[in-house]
Amino acid sequence: MTRRPAPFGRRRALVTESERHGAYFVIRCRDADGPPPGPGQFYMLSAAERWGGGQAERPFLPRAFSVLRADGGELQFLIEDVGPGTNRLSELGPGDELAIVGPLGNGFTPPSEGRAALLVGGGVGIAPLAIWQDALGDRATTLLGFRDAAHAAGAALLANPTVATDDGSVGHHGLVTELLEDELDERADEIEVYACGPPAMLEAVRAVSVARSVPAQLALESGMACGFGACFGCVVPTTDGYIRLCVDGPVLQASQLESTLVAGAGH
Amino acid sequence: MTVDFCGIELAHPVVNASGTFDAIAAHRAFGDELLERFPFAAFVSKTVTLEPRQGNPPPRLWEVAGGLINSIGLPNKGLTGYLEHDLPFLAELPVPLIVNVMGFSRDEVADLVDAFAERPEVSALELNVSCPNVETGLIMGADPDETARLVNRVRPLTAKPLIVKLTPNATDVPAVAQAAQHAGADAISLINTIRGMALEPKSGEPWLGGVTGGVSGPAVRAIALAQVHAVAQTVEIPIVGMGGVQSGADARDLMRAGATLVAVGTESFRDPAAGQRVASELSELLAHTAV
């Protein structure tokens, strides 16, 4: 499918709502002129005002976020306040503006013939699975893992998820990849896996998918300065050497990777 | 606002810093709008080396106050790959093309200059001298004599303008600039990034895969201004000034310090169209005040 490219340059997007979901918040903005993003694509976000000048004069660079949902010129992003960039974004409310560049990167592609999508997400990495689930029409089996109950509140953003938590406070007490293994035990030859989450979780998904010859599309994360191939900062090692995650990803086939545990990822 | 730079007519004085904008990747992201609104008056391509390079292991970036440290390691397809895969597209850009090259010896640089010497697609060459000469161990651009020997070696190979891109990590940058001019350089560009380092907060280990990297962004602007000013006192050839330019006012400062052209680098990471904005702000400022 050929998608409309991102408009050239940074543009402003009016924030219409910022809503808490446990440990996360969902920020909504108007982007009437931008093309609709594909599931798994991302945007570079910054606050239009006071980006920089915070603690230690950061943030400076925009931050990359997968789009959580998009509908009728509205974009939604899922954010957890973990550093200077996400902290500044957490302050934004209705009437404030984001500066955005996007949609960028290559998203998910439909499952191969005869296979059904199985979505596996962890933490804030559930974001691209929501828009993908929307596109698939809610039929996809969805397994989500979180640290604790506060983070598991994010599960309500997707339809009919099965939830695992590290501390057992919600759903299965253990790892989401244990739920994945159960599914693969039953129907490995009927599934295509779509996953996004912290590096260790993605690595477990990659390893089990490859071991069982199940196709898997993994949405990776890496620190990015630009998001459009200029800085060469976001490389990950693949079977074909280093590739820029922003223009050659962020969705990669599990078979392209020897590991998702890239130095610096998830920082 | 047209500018004559070494005989090349440019629509305005704002170009990109080498290695901070990949026109091919940007065209994939932004489509033909990139070409319709191309943000720079000339395009300076990322450093080309003789052999392909993968670049440094990640992590490659660290954000600092007012900028970032990068340790990219000059990944590129090598000369053959560049000529085959990149040059045909870059030749079609709506602006003149300046090719940046780097070698690990004078012979390597000579081979690269030779390869572009007769190429009609290429308007000028920029020599990245922020690199150790494997034969002497010296950073070529850190030493006036090394720089002079390099420029002397490649000058006879091409009639195209030769720009020498200086490193700020040198004891006496104006002396290096003067040596380059004396050996036949047509222009000087500066500054390259300033060597810096970051430690992972918990472990205390170097964060960057390459251990150290180069600092860029507004954090280095005052240093760039001082170096451009000092070099402008020493040479008569034109200067491409860069370092932390975010606005037309920053660009005008570098021009007031002696630059003929100004390059935008890190700011393009924050806004891909930053070059266009800087150029239009600069045009506005120059219409109202004298440089």
Image (tube, helix red, strand yellow):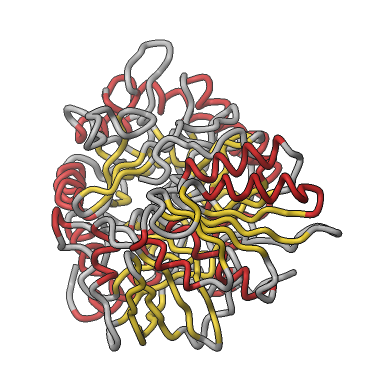
Relative image position of residue B104 (x, y in whole percent): 46, 21
Q: In this rendering, would A115 be left or right of B38?
A: right
Vertical comparison of B199 with A205: above or below? above
The residue at the far right in this view is A114
Relative image position of residue A195 (x, y in whole percent): 59, 54
Relative image position of residue B207 (x, y in whole percent): 31, 34
Q: In this rendering, would B180 be left or right of B7?
A: left
> In terms of depth relative to the viewer, which is nearer, B107 or A76?
A76
Relative image position of residue B231 (x, y in whole percent): 20, 42
Q: Quadrant of residue B138?
A: top left
- Residue occupying the point 68% across, 49% down: A216
- Residue occupying the point 35% across, 41% down: B70
> In terms of depth relative to the viewer, which is nearer, A192 or A231?
A192
Vertical comparison of B103 with A52: above or below? above
Task: Classify the position of the N terminus of chain A by image quarter.
Answer: bottom right
Examine the rendering and report whether any part of residue B13 can be seen.
Answer: no
Q: Quadrant of residue A131?
A: bottom right
Q: In this rendering, would A19 be left or right of A35?
A: left
- Residue occupying the point 56% across, 40% down: A204
Task: Classify the position of the C terminus of chain A by image quarter.
Answer: top left
- Residue occupying the point 47% across, 46% down: A174
Examine the rendering and report whether any part of residue B169 can be seen.
Answer: yes
